Amino acid sequence: MYGTVVRTEQLTPHLVRVVLGGEGLDDFAEPTFADSYVNMFFLPPGAGYQPPFDTEAVRDLPRERRPYPRRISVRSWDPRRRELTVDIAVHGEVGYAGRWARHTAPGDRVQLRGPAGDFSPPPSAEAYLLVGDESALPAVAACLESVPAGRPALALVEVDGPDEELALDSPGDLRVVYVHRDGHPDPSRLLADALAAAPLPPGRLSAFVHGEAESIRAVRRHLLERALVDPALLSCSPYWRRGSTDEEWRSVKADWVRAMQADTP
């Protein structure tokens, strides 16, 4: 399965929206989770082939010619137009996904698989907390749109500065707090410190905590050590780690997650 770029939009200095369409999405299924994602396959320079390609056959290629799969959050799916929208964090030429989003243009193709996911705001909760940085902002935005009408929701989002803030919407009673990392001596503490200072919405809390590894680890520890959320209502996922390349992070992520879970079971 593959998508053809229909249009792109620079949402903020470091967030690019890409809308995919075309006959390659004929078999794309309606996402069933608010945090749904697709695996997108980004080609290295000089790969020598283009989508669509046989994903099994390319496994036999030398590493430098094989595609790099990355999980990308589904921002939205339009079943009438059969268009898939993804928002991708871009930081110059760093990272295969961001580099592709920065340079892609209408008519380009990208191979993908999915959708998959595992979180939607549970209707059993009475209030909702969503925490993350710009890498998680598309998933946070999508989840906010699935909060039951009228229920309190707090979105706590870390970005570089004011020009990185996006307007967020929800049928719930939404409060949005942006925190800025620009110039902060310890960005890994920003979200946890902001959470400690923010009044939480009352009631049985559901928490969605995704983004940079050390930041979400600190937030998870704060929530669980203070029994602010039932572990069964906590979704916590590290997308990347400051100071590590994509491939370095992928090689240690499973062990790192186990260590995080051992912090505060």
Image (cartoon, rainbow, N blue to C red):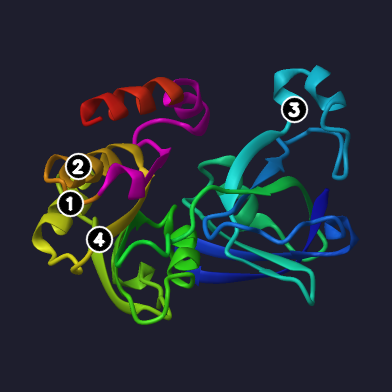
Image location of residue 169, percent across then percent down: 42, 79
> Circle 4 is placed at which residue position?
204
Quick one: label 3 or label 4, which is nearer the N terminus?
3
- Of the 4 image quadrants, the one containing the C terminus is top left
Viewer-side label of 3, 4:
4
Q: Secondary structure at mark 1?
A: loop
**Nearest to the observer: residue 178 or residue 160:** 178
Q: Is residue 192 above or below residue 48?
A: below
Count residues near mark 4 (Cα–Cα under 10 Å), then give few for <14, some for 14-19, many for 20+: some
**Nearest to the observer: residue 203 or residue 213:** 203
Measure how far apart labels 4 and 1 are at the Cα level.
9 Å
Q: Secondary structure at mark 4?
A: loop
Image location of residue 118, percent across then percent down: 53, 47
Quick one: label 3 or label 2, which is nearer the N terminus?
3
Measure how far apart labels 2 and 4 are at the Cα level.
14 Å
Count residues near mark 3 (Cα–Cα under 10 Å), then give few for <14, some for 14-19, many for 20+: many
Given contact means CB atoms under 8 Å apart, are the residues at marks 2 and 4 in contact?
A: no
Query: What numbered label is drawn on residue 224?
Result: 2
Quick one: label 2 or label 4, which is nearer the N terminus?
4
Q: Secondary structure at mark 3?
A: loop
Given contact means CB atoms under 8 Å apart, are the residues at marks 3 and 2 in contact?
A: no
Viewer-side label of 2, 4:
4
Q: How many marks?
A: 4
Q: Amino acid at mark 2?
A: Leu
User: Which residue range is magenta in the image?
Assistant: 230-253
Query: Does the stretch in magenta take in 61?
Result: no
